[in-house]
Image: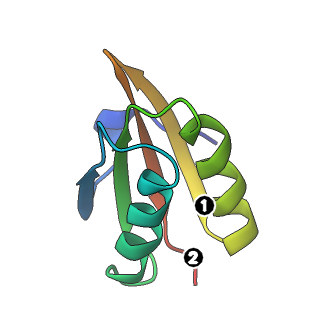
Amino acid sequence: MLEKPGEIQIDKEIDARGSFCPGPLMELIRGIRAIPVGGTLALLSSDPGSARDVPAWVQKAGHELLGTFPEQGYTRFVVRRKR
């Protein structure tokens, strides 16, 4: 179930706007390692490739994508660390 941005407590936010592939994904991987299991991370990315790369990596890595929220000029990806 995807939640609304205002309903999710964010433990860490990474602003990767202006960074291009694979930058945002590398920032997400580094950031997810820095939060505890059960924590949530928001990644802000203006790279169109993130729409494909982030959900694929989250699923492969065994985490949970809580939502993908389009904003003006970028997308906010919210991920919960599961392991």
Q: Residue at x 45, y 83 (%)?
A: 37
Viewport quadrant of the N terminus: top right
> Residues at badges 1 and 2 in contact (C-beta under 8 Å)?
yes
Q: Residue 81: percent from the left, percent from the top?
A: 50, 72
State the mark number for residue 34. none
| Mark 1 secondary-structure assignment | strand
Q: Nearer the viewer, residue 74 or 12?
A: 74
Q: Residue tagged by mark 2?
A: 82
Indicate left or right for 13 with 30 as reference.
Answer: left
Q: Residue furthest top?
A: 72
Q: Residue 52: percent from the left, percent from the top?
A: 67, 40
Q: Residue 25: percent from the left, percent from the top?
A: 50, 57
Q: Nearer the viewer, residue 21 or 77?
A: 21
Vertical position of residue 28 compared to residue 71: above or below: below
Q: Residues within 10 Å of mark 1 (few under 14, many from 20)?
A: some
Q: Residues within 10 Å of mark 2 (few under 14, many from 20)?
A: some
Q: Amino acid at mark 1?
A: Glu
Indicate left or right for 14 with 67 as reference.
Answer: left
Vertical position of residue 31 compared to residue 48: above or below: below
Q: Residue at x 29, y 36 (%)?
A: 18
Q: Residue tagged by mark 1?
A: 64
Viewport quadrant of the C terminus: bottom right
Q: Is the image coloured rainbow, by chain, by secondary structure, or in one colour?
A: rainbow
Q: Residue at x 55, y 41 (%)?
A: 50
